[in-house]
Image (spheres, helix red, strand yellow):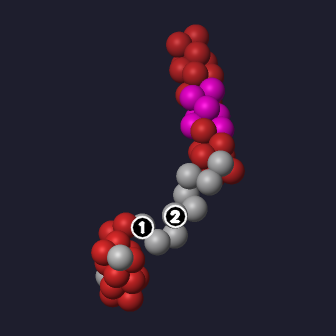
Amino acid sequence: MQIIVILIFVSLVLAGLFLGAFLWATKSGQFDDYQSPSVRILSEEETIENEITNYE
């Protein structure tokens, strides 16, 4: 019976650590990339502008 109490306590601590890590990542801007590189290539205007500036 004691092992159940210990496992519940450990799982709550672990869940709290994961929640803390998620909140820290959110506040530090880890999820602020709204236009990822996989979507950026679909925009032809930016690609053409980047190619022109790279060759000059």
From the image, which quarter does the N terminus lie in? top right
The residue lying at 60 percent from left, 46 percent from top is 25
- Callout 1 touching callout 2 (CB < 8 Å): yes
The residue lying at 58 percent from left, 11 percent from top is 2
Query: Which amino acid does the dot numbered 2 rest on?
Result: Asp
In the current view of this chain or complex, which residue is farthest to the right? 27
- Per the image, the residue denoted by label 2 is 33
Is residue 50 visible to us here? no
Query: Which amino acid does the dot numbered 1 rest on?
Result: Ser
Q: Secondary structure at mark 2?
A: loop
Disc 2 residue crowd, few under 14, some 14–19, many 20+, Cα 10 Å: few
The residue lying at 58 percent from left, 16 percent from top is 6
Disc 1 residue crowd, few under 14, some 14–19, many 20+, Cα 10 Å: few
Tell whether position 3 is magenta.
Answer: no
Pick the residue in front: 55 or 48.
55
**Where is residue 56 drawn, in percent x and y?**
35, 76
Q: Is the stretch drawn in magenta largely helix, strand or loop?
A: helix
41 relative to 45, above or below: above
**Where is residue 37 drawn, in percent x and y?**
37, 67
Q: Magenta region: which residues?
A: 13-20
The count of marks equals 2
- Per the image, the residue denoted by label 1 is 36
**Where is residue 8 drawn, in percent x and y?**
58, 25
Pick the residue in front: 39 or 26.
39
